[in-house]
Image (tube, rainbow, N blue to C red):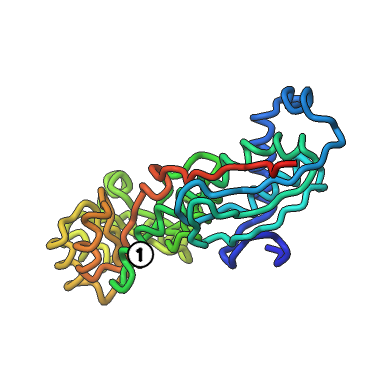
Amino acid sequence: MPEERPGVADLGLDLGEVQRIVLTALTEDLGTPPRDVTSESTIPAGQIDTAELVARADGVVAGLLVAAEVFAATSAGTATFQAVATDGDRVRRGDVLAVITGPTRALLTAERTALNLICRMSGVATHTRKWADLLAGSGATVLDTRKTTPGLRMLEKYAVRAGGGTNKRMGLYDVAMIKDNHKLAAGSITAAYTLVRQTFPDVVVQVEVTTLAEAQEAVEAGADFLLCDNMTPEALAEVVRVVGDRVELEATGNLTLETAAAYANTGVDYLSVGGLTHSSPILDIALDLRPR
């Protein structure tokens, strides 16, 4: 991630993947061959203007680099994008997040695609920050899941990091997660763990458990990480007491902001929240042309 890229904290964002996503999104909006029939009809080709990305609500911003790449794509690299905020910043309604100068047609052609992406990412970051703030000082960290928008996983997981959360795994390829159906298919937790370890000896293995007995079996098998699914805080506290010094533990299943403290207070390491990526509302952000 080049340092000169605008508005990006040290959170890890692959520029090539961003550009691929931007191209897909623009193609969806502009068609083939690409055209913006309204802007091409109403705005002279040589007109230059300056616009601002402005927060319409309080929240946490994420996706400034992504927005910058949209404007770069529609202007053939001629637009200038000056970030005023940085991804991960808390922003207030009315704050200017970035200033863009370039061909007016290009600015308006980019507008909806840029806003779709930055509003979505900032919504995820804002929701995540609520969880991170609530868990501060508890020793627990909020995790995301694979319940992401198809095609946008990299951006949404980046937004979780911008909001103060942590990514559990990026996909099926980097971490083995033994869930109920794997246990049933293999015959038991121990059998499933043994098969994964034999096939992929270096991969981290996580196991979903629903009882203390399953937790003990998974630990004895050699699991690195347990997902304690749909347990009460009392049951989870008992798992923490019995095996918490031997593995990392995650509470998962229908967690809410209202119940978060009770689960964090059990001593668990992580709270897993699919809603960070599947149910976060957008953060309202607008593109406003400056008066001429």
Q: In this orientation, which residue lies closer to the viewer: 226 or 113?
A: 113
In the displayed structure image, the side of residue 27 where residue 179 appears, left or right: left
Q: In this orientation, which residue lies closer to the viewer: 269 or 280?
A: 280
User: Would you name the residue on which mark 1 appears?
Assistant: 133
Q: In this orientation, which residue lies closer to the viewer: 29 or 112?
A: 112
Q: Is 280 situated above or below 217?
A: above
Specify few, some or many for label 1: CA neighbours under 10 Å numbering under 14, 14-19, or 20 or more.
few
Query: Quick one: SS at disc 1?
Result: helix
Task: In the displayed orientation, state which residue is furthest to the front.
Answer: 292
x and y, in percent, of residue 108 in the image: 70, 35
Residue 239 seen from this side: yes
Q: Residue at x 36, y 58 (%)?
A: 130
Task: In the displayed orientation, state which residue is furthest to the bottom.
Answer: 245
x and y, in percent, of residue 21 in the image: 64, 43
x and y, in percent, of residue 206 in the image: 36, 60
Q: Is 137 situated above or below 95?
A: below
